[in-house]
């Protein structure tokens, strides 16, 4: 594998956080495209829409910037903890409700 990258000096390996997917970046790209270019636009034809999308891509590619993760590992882990605790609490509430309905109270 190292030889592969030695032959391609412009290529770089990027590691994403384990709690995030590369798909998040793809989704963010399309969200930005929608928000900044096509969301409020009026396109009379497919060709006009394609032209608007191409213009956005060319603008973004003219001044590329690396994606920077804004959340720390602690922020991500705390979010997971909150989700897990809320899930456990909800499951407990559902169990109590089911027991109450079964007993006829």
Image (tube, rainbow, N blue to C red):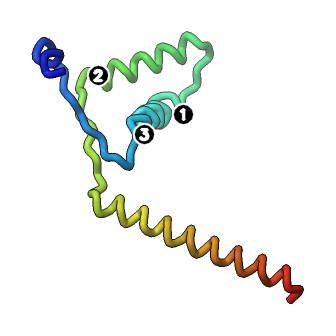
Q: Residue at x 29, y 22 (%)?
A: 61
What residue is shown with label 2? 61
Task: Give how far across and how far down residue 19 sits, in percent.
Answer: 38, 49
Mark 3 vs 1, N-terminal side: 3
Q: Residue at x 29, y 52 (%)?
A: 70
Q: Using the rendered image of the protein, determine whether residue 9 is visible from the camera's viewpoint.
A: no
Judged from the image, the secondary structure of the residue bearing numbered disc 3 is helix
Label 3 to label 1: alpha-carbon separation = 23 Å
View extreme (right): residue: 104
What residue is shown with label 1? 40
- Please tell me whether residue 88 is drawn above or below residue 36 in the rendered image: below
- Could you say which is closer to the camera, residue 59 or residue 14? 14
Q: Using the rendered image of the protein, determine whether residue 53 is visible from the camera's viewpoint.
A: yes
Badge 3: few (under 14), some or many (20 or more) residues near its Cα, within 10 Å?
A: few
Number of the front mark, 3 or 1:
3
Judged from the image, the secondary structure of the residue bearing numbered disc 2 is helix
What residue is shown with label 3? 24
């Amino acid at each position: 594998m190292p030889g592969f990258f030695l032959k391609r000096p412009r290529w770089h390996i990027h590691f994403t956080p384990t709690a995030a997917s590369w798909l998040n970046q793809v989704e963010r790209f399309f969200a930005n495209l929608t928000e900044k270019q096509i969301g409020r636009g009026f396109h009379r034809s497919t060709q006009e829409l394609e032209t608007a999308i191409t213009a956005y891509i060319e603008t973004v590619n003219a001044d590329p910037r690396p994606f920077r993760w804004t959340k720390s590992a602690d922020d991500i882990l705390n979010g997971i903890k909150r989700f897990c605790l809320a899930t456990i609490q909800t499951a407990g509430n559902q169990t109590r409700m089911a027991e109450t309905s079964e007993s006829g109270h």
